[in-house]
Structure formats: structure tokens, C-alpha cells
């Protein structure tokens, strides 16, 4: 069977949600927990926990196990989902380094739009002026600058002498996301 290839921007939309991160952190804390235990642990209903956990599972970041009527989840990547293992490792590193939910969400939101990924791929080739980026990505000028601002504010790109270039993020999730975005 071939690997599943969910889009990075959709996966980042899943990661960029604090409730889902709290559930994932609870799993990191407890190894394997039931849906009800996790809901109580973070203060949400079992129904809401179940919905959020299924979303994380669909991205290959956690694995369910059914025992009778209960469902338990553990932090184990689905190897059929491309990049799930490296993303889960990066998220676990954020957990272990106690990087705030706010910072994890901030990193993930850099890649919640396919145009920002197109910009990163164009900059992976070489540093480029905005006019050149517009030609390569075919993004309208106002949109291009909105996306560039988002990437720059999250320190994935920098500008020097009017040309944009990729930057090196200073945390494990940022490095992982940039690597995946560049890989195309």
C-alpha cells in the first residue's frame, strides 16, 4: 500500500488548535488514555474529546485501540501517513521542551495556507525579490505581501536588500515544518 499524503496546510490547521494540542500533550503525559480520561483531564466533554481525537488520528499523529466500548489513544504515528512520524517527533520535542501552546500554534499557522507553502518552495530555490516571487508563484501582489508578512513574523523567512530568503527556525516544530514544506 502506498503512503497517504495529506496536505501540509490541512495538517497544520489540525495542529494549530489548542484543544487538540492539549489532548496530544495529555497522551504524551499518560502514554495511553481513554477518550473519557482525556476529556476529564483537559476539561472538555467526552464527545468533544472524541471528535478532536479522531481529527488527530486522521492526520496519522495518534493511534486508537478499542477495548470493549472504550477507545484508547496513544502517541504513535501511522507510518502510512507521509511525514506523520517526523511531525509527531517534533510535537513531542515541543512538549518535552515545554514550548507553549501559543508558540506551537504560531508555528503551525505559518503553513495553514497552500500559497505560503508555494512561497517557501520558491525560496528554497533561491532568494527572490517580490516581483520574481509573484511571477513564480502567480500570487497577486496584495496576497503575496500578506503571506510574506505571516511567514516573516513567524521567522520562516527574512528579507535582506529587498530579497526574501528562507530562515532557520529556532524550535523543532519549525524546523520540521520548513523541511516538509520545502520537500514538495
Image: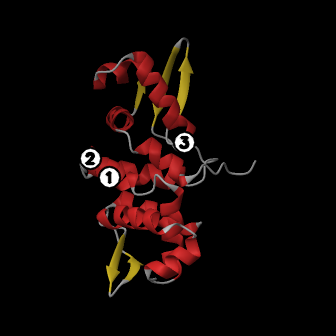
- Determine which of the numbered discs, if any, sits on residue 106 in the image: 1
Up the image or down, 139 lies above or below 45; here it is below
Q: Residues within 10 Å of mark 2 (few under 14, many from 20)?
A: few
User: Is residue 149 visible in this depiction of the protein?
Assistant: yes
Say whether marks 2 and 1 touch (CB < 8 Å). Answer: yes
13 is higher (above) or lower (below) than 19: below
Q: Nearer the viewer, residue 177 or 172?
A: 177
What residue is disc 2 on? 102
User: Could you give the CA–CA distance between mark 1 and mark 3, rounded to whole angstroms?
Assistant: 19 Å
Which residue is drawn at the image coordinates 35% and 33% (left, top)?
A: 19
- State which quadrant residue 167 falls in: bottom left
Q: Which residue is mark 3?
A: 59
> Looking at the image, is mark 3 or mark 2 earlier in the sequence?
3
Q: CA distance from mark 2 to mark 1?
A: 6 Å
Q: Where is residue 65 drawn, in percent x and y?
A: 54, 26
How packed is label 1: few (under 14 Cα within 10 Å), some, or many (20 or more)? some
Q: Report how far apart the C-alphas of labels 3 and 2 lie in the structure.
A: 21 Å
Amino acid at each position: 500500500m502506498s503512503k497517504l499524503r495529506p496536505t501540509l496546510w490541512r495538517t497544520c490547521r489540525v495542529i494549530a488548535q489548542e484543544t487538540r494540542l492539549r489532548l496530544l500533550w495529555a497522551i504524551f503525559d499518560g502514554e495511553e488514555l481513554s477518550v473519557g480520561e482525556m476529556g476529564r483531564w483537559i476539561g472538555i466533554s467526552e464527545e468533544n474529546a472524541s471528535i478532536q481525537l479522531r481529527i488527530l488520528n486522521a492526520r496519522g499523529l495518534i493511534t486508537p485501540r478499542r477495548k470493549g466500548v472504550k477507545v484508547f489513544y496513544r502517541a504513535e504515528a501511522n507510518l502510512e501517513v507521509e511525514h506523520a512520524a517526523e511531525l509527531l517527533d517534533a510535537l513531542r520535542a515541543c512538549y518535552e521542551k515545554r514550548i507553549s501552546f501559543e508558540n506551537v500554534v504560531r508555528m503551525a499557522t505559518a503553513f495553514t495556507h497552500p500559497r505560503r507553502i508555494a512561497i517557501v518552495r520558491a525560496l528554497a530555490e533561491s532568494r527572490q525579490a517580490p516581483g520574481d516571487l509573484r511571477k513564480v508563484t502567480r500570487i497577486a501582489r496584495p496576497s503575496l505581501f500578506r503571506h510574506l508578512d505571516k511567514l516573516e513574523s513567524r521567522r520562516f523567512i527574512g528579507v535582506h536588500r529587498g530579497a526574501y530568503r528562507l530562515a532557520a527556525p529556532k524550535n523543532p516544530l519549525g524546523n520540521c515544518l520548513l523541511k516538509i514544506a520545502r520537500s514538495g
